[in-house]
Structures are given as C-alpha cells and as structure tokens.
Amino acid sequence: MPVDRPRGATMRVLGIETSCDETAAAVVTGEGEILSDVVRSQLADHAPYGGIVPEIAARAHVAALDGIVAEAMRRAGIGFGALDAVAATGGPGLIGGVIVGVMTAKGIAVARSIPFIAVNHLEGHALTARLTDGVDYPYLLLLVSGGHTQLLIVEGVGAYRRLGTTIDDAVGEAFDKTAKMLGLGYPGGPAVEKAAKGGDSARFALPRPMKGRPGAHFSFSGLKTAVRHTIEALPPGPVGATDTADICASFQQAVGEAIADRTRNAIRAFRDAHPDGTALVVAGGVAANAHLRSVLESLAAAEGMRFVAPPPRLCTDNGAMIAWAGIERLKRGEVTGLDFAPRPRWPLDPDAPKVAFAGVKA
Ligand code: KG4
Ligand code: ZN
C-alpha cells in the first residue's frame, strides 16, 4: 500500500515493543533522531519465578502500555496528530504480549487515520546499526539474543540471507541458565558479566562448541551441561564468590571463542558474496556484553572489517528499534493491513535451509 506524504516534512513514527519482558515505546524521526525512548522492565514481576512467565508478561503489558506510550509522546513533545505512522512488534515473541502491542498500535492507527506497520522484532534488532551508525547495506549481522543466535547477511530491508543459526540453545539462554545454576537470578546475562569481573577465565576448561568446524552454525547446550558438571564437581553447598567468578569468566571466555570462530567463517562467506561489504554488526541483548564486544572488535580488526555495536541500551529490547524498522518500511511505501495477525514465529529468512545434525533436533 503506497503512502502519500508531503515532500520534505520530517517523518515521525511511534514504535511499540511488547514481545518479551520489556514494555517499550519510542518516537523516532526519519533522520534517525530518537525523540523519546521509554522502557519498563518487568523484571520484578518475573523475579519470584526465576524466568519469564508468559501470562504474567501479557498482563503486565496490558497494565503498563498505555502509560508508556503516553510518556513516550510526552517526552517527544508531540501529539498523536504529528505522527506519520505507528509501528509495533508483530512477532516473533510471546504471543500474549505481541497481541497487546499490535492491538494498541492498530487502535492508535484507526483513531488517528495513520498507517500501522507490523515490525518483525528481529528486523528491529537487525536494522538498529543503521539508526545508530548509519551503516550501509550490505553488512554482516551477528544477532545474539535470548531466543536467537544467528549470522545473517543483511542485503536490504526485508532481504536477509542466513549463514548460520544455533542447532540447540540460544546464547542468551546459555547465559540465563548459567546464572540460574549459580543462583545469580534473572536475567542472567548482566549478572554473569558482573560476576565474571576479576574471575580466572582459564581455571575451568569448558568446551568451545563447534569451534574449528566448517560453516557458521552454533551450539550452546553442551557448554551449558559442562557448566552444570563443573558446579556439581565443587564441594557441596552454595557456590562461593571466587568459584562463581571463575566459572562466569571461564564461561564468557568459551562463549567468546566459540562465537568468534563461527563469525570468522561467516565473514569469509560474506566477503565471497559481497566483495564490497565492509561492516560486521552485532545486535540483540547479548551484544550488550563487553567481553563479547571486545572479542568481536579484535576479530573485525584482524579481518579488516569495520565493527559496529549499538550502545547497550539499544541492544536490549526497546521501542526505538521498532520505530526505526517502521521508518525504513514507510520510506519504501510499505505499510501493514489492519487484518494483520500477530505471529509467534516469524523467521527473518524463511528460505534458509533447516539445520539438522546427526543426533540433534532440527
Ligand atoms: O534482545 P533481548 O533483550 O530479548 C530477546 O529478544 O531475547 O535479549 C535478552 C537476552 C537475555 O538472555 C539476557 O540475559 C541477555 O540478552 N543479555 C546479556 C547481557 N544483557 C542482556 N547477555 C550477556 N551479557 C549482557 N550484558
Ligand atoms: Zn530482542
């Protein structure tokens, strides 16, 4: 559906994110200026359960979203009448939350007669580096979050070619499970990173899954099991501070080496496909990890690539990335019909071959 708009007017889009445990809204301009960016974490709602409870997440989004949207508009200093479109995460994610965001966005779109744009959450992460650093297509993207671990060539809006994915757990899941086993709470990523400071990364010889194998697929379930065995081999009782620090540091070291190995192969495949491509971009919640960022920075330097990592706040879930993906779609005249149904699953590259390894579920 094409969209008519006056030439030269500044485009402003409201973005809504509700696919997991952050209720978020932001207003972003067509030039990439973030006018507001409001995020409410549901951490306290889920903390007693040690992980995200989908039903609690959906209810918390219902309770918070109207206020978060109002706050995003207030901070942006504009009324709904100044919006060119409203974008919301349409999937993939926890379906109850996605429904809340999509229905709210559709309501605003209808009430204000502006276009609605359903954004793929992964596309939001994938395009963040264009919002923050103006990276040109094509680029190589390492997407590392709680639900996904993928290497993709981003050739344009909606044009993604997957080079690798995880054959079992996502890397964020491995962080979260490691934290849980050590009693560090949820979400595990930031807790493991903090606990690893000052730890001895060489004390425990944890596996570097898939390292040295051809291709760019990942695996993290063996590493998670090795962490469990390491903890079980310690004296009984709560794990002490030094052991916790050493386990977390050894775990981060293993993750960093495994990811660097896979990414190196992907850089070479990317260069074969796009000799003009120069950037390695990292995105998703785990991209907030300082150790991983420094490992990837060194790898990119060694491979002669530019390395781009959005600020940590824009790596974890937020509304600005959804608004920006909406802007990229809107600039192409692409908007979504109001009959859009929220999608629990929505791959970025639906044509990617299924991965199936002997003895491993696809
Ligand atoms: O992108 P995101 O906010 O939500 C999803 O779309 O999944 O990613 C959340 C994941 C969680 O697994 C969390 O533990 C991890 O990102 N994470 C981190 C860090 N901050 C968040 N992992 C490692 N180090 C961090 N600093
Ligand atoms: Zn995410």
Image: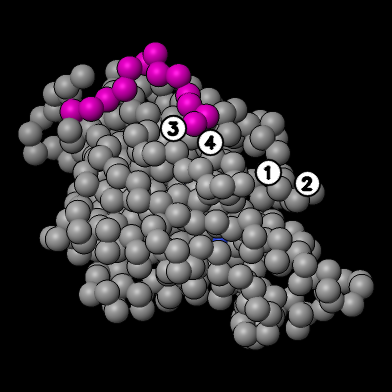
Specify whether 231 is left or right of 325.
right
Q: How far apart are marks 4 and 1 (CA)?
A: 12 Å
Q: Is mark 3 on a helix, strand or loop?
A: loop
Residue 267 in the image, given as x and y percentages of width and height: 29, 63
- Tell me whether circle 1 and circle 3 mark residues in contact (CB < 8 Å): no
**Closer mark to the observer between disc 4 and disc 2:** 4
Residue 310 visible in image: no
Q: Between disc 1 and disc 3, whose residue precedes?
A: 1
Disc assigned to residue 307: none
Disc assigned to residue 52: 1
Q: Mark 3 points at which residue?
A: 346
- In this rendering, is residue 301 above or below 159? below
- Residue farthest top in this picture: 339
Disc assigned to residue 49: 2
- Tell me whether circle 2 and circle 1 mark residues in contact (CB < 8 Å): yes
Magenta stretch contains residue 338:
yes
Q: Residue at x 22, y 47 (%)?
A: 155
- CB at mark 4 closer than 8 A to ligand 1? yes
Magenta stretch contains residue 314:
no
Comparing 190 with 39, the one in front is: 190
Disc assigned to residue 93: 4
